[in-house]
Amino acid sequence: MEREFEYCLVGNIVEKHYFGEDKEIRYGYKHFRGGAKVYIFPEYGGMGHENIRVIGLPRKKNRVIDIIIPSKLITNVRVKKIYNPNLKEIIIENFYYSRWKEEMETELKSIEKFAESINNYNKEHYAIN
């Protein structure tokens, strides 16, 4: 039975961050404007999620891209209900999301816990005041 929606992690690209040895301040990410909304698909858990797969609308194109970026460039990670059929299909096929499908309450709690851990880690290690 297909559900009306799927839960997905959603975040925003950081407005500014340090780059390089000289700690130069950069705005956004080369593919995304600062504040751009991205859908997060954790796939590389064995590597501590330093890099993470995202889908979002880039700076210079009118269609979404699917790329791997450093997770430190994502802020305000939260859980959203996704109704878009194309995104729902990707969520259903994603290993991270598919392992929580047994019970919706467990699924939501597990995804919220992951979102909180990303937010806390990035705030402690990469925040620019």
Image (tube, grey):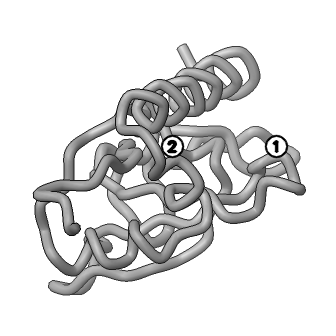
**How far across and down, in percent of the image, does residue 93 sit?**
47, 76
Tag 1, which secondary structure? loop
Q: Quadrant of residue 25?
A: top right
Q: How many marks?
A: 2
Instruction: Note whether 52 is above or below 58 in the view shown.
Output: above
Q: Residue at x 46, y 27 (%)?
A: 112
Camera-nearest residue between 55 and 105: 105
Q: Residue at x 67, y 64 (%)?
A: 43
- The reply, left or right, for residue 123 in relation to residue 11 is right
Q: Assess disc 2: are there few (<14), some (14-19) or many (≥20) residues with their C-alpha within 10 Å of its C-alpha.
A: many
- The reply, left or right, for residue 64 in relation to residue 72 is left
Q: Assess disc 1: are there few (<14), some (14-19) or many (≥20) residues with their C-alpha within 10 Å of its C-alpha.
A: few
**How far across and down, in percent of the image, does residue 22 sit?**
82, 43
Residue identified by numbered label 1: 22
Q: Which is closer to the viewer, label 2 or label 1?
A: 2
Q: Residue at x 80, y 51 (%)?
A: 20
Give how far apart the Cα atoms at labels 2 and 1 are.
22 Å
Residue 74 - label: 2
Q: Residue at x 61, y 71 (%)?
A: 68
> What amino acid does circle 2 point to?
Ile
Camera-nearest residue between 104 and 52: 104
Q: Quadrant of residue 88?
A: bottom left
Tag 2, which secondary structure? strand
Q: Earlier in the sequence, mark 2 or mark 1?
A: 1
> What amino acid does circle 1 point to?
Asp
Camera-nearest residue between 88 and 67: 88
